[in-house]
Image (cartoon, grey):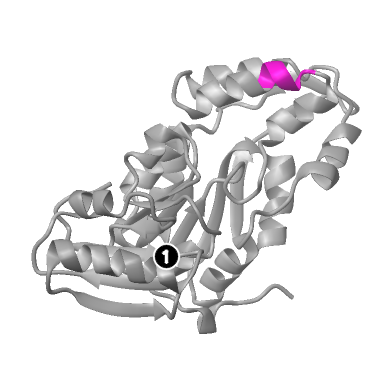
Amino acid sequence: METNVPSLVLVSPSGEKVLEEAVARLEALWGDMAISTIEAGEAVHLSAATGDVEEAISWLQGLPLDVSTKAPMRMGLVVADMDSTIIGCECLDELADFAGKKAEVSAITERAMAGELDFEGALTARVAMLAGLPLTALEDCYHARVRLNPGAEIFIKTMAHLGAQCALVSGGFTFFTSRVAAAAGFHSQRANRLIDDGTHLTGQVGQPILGKEAKLAALKEDAARLKLPLTHTLAIGDGANDLMMIEAAGLGIAYYAKPIVAARAPARIDHGSLESALFFQGISRNAFVRPA
């Protein structure tokens, strides 16, 4: 996380007592500080004239808090990863289960998301294991395995209602992103394309593969199209292929992320739902858009 910025947004999924403890600890460290309530009992913004954010975070160890080191500001563009961020699974791993190869594929996925493997090579190798899988398995997988993560629909539909553009940008596959984007309320979606012969997957993926550079490019292209500086953008994800866009955005959020991502993101959701991404921007519950 960023250092030497005496500003923190704290979100407590566990309630007011945790926030009170956090504020007391930081008052002992920082002394005088401004305290602004974002949502009573749930979210506050703390700032001080001087102080070190990394030291402050260390004083909060052991408290179940989602934390942002950025002063709250409403963003005009959201770029979100899909697998294990907006939804609660890795679609490729779940497809592999239908092919009887989940263990082998999941092992590669874990290493790729941790930054231990080249993303493009790892994706190609995993998709090759799906050769011969009937196309009906994709529909079965979507309906049986794919679920929006807690707060996803509220997060995206609230941002859209407040005027932000919301883009789903995934290293996964268009079959799933098209459906998830519609369910959560995204304006657009980009992903990789599984190649089939009309009835079965061929084990190939369309080129070029959408990886970490393409995610960063999507953030920059959408911001330029909207005439927004990157400081007014939000990027959120969990894996190593999300890190470039997370670091480039004005508000980069690591969502239950791999260590390499969590260590470098200026904001982290480790305890609550995707609603924390709204609190990080200073948006209170009375502005939330509830699912129909």
Answer yes or no: is residue 152 visible.
yes
Q: Which residues are magenta?
A: 101-105
Estimate the x, y position of residue 206 in percent, counting from the top left. Answer: 65, 27
- Mark 1 is surrounded, within 10 Å at the Cα level, by few (under 14), some (14 to 19) or many (20 or more) other residues, namely many
110 left or right of 222 in image: right
Q: Looking at the image, which residue is at 56% across and 65% down? A: 155
Q: Looking at the image, which residue is at 26% across and 68% down? A: 24
Give above or below for 213 relative to 71.
above
Give above or below for 190 relative to 269.
above
160 left or right of 17 in image: right
Estimate the x, y position of residue 150 in percent, counting from the top left. Answer: 63, 59
Which is the main secondary structure of the residues drawn in magenta? Answer: helix
Q: Which residue is mark 1?
A: 11
Estimate the x, y position of residue 130 in percent, counting from the top left. Answer: 77, 20
Between 200 and 269, the residue placed more toward the observer is: 269
35 left or right of 166 in image: left
Give above or below for 198 relative to 20.
above
Whether residue 129 is in magenta: the answer is no
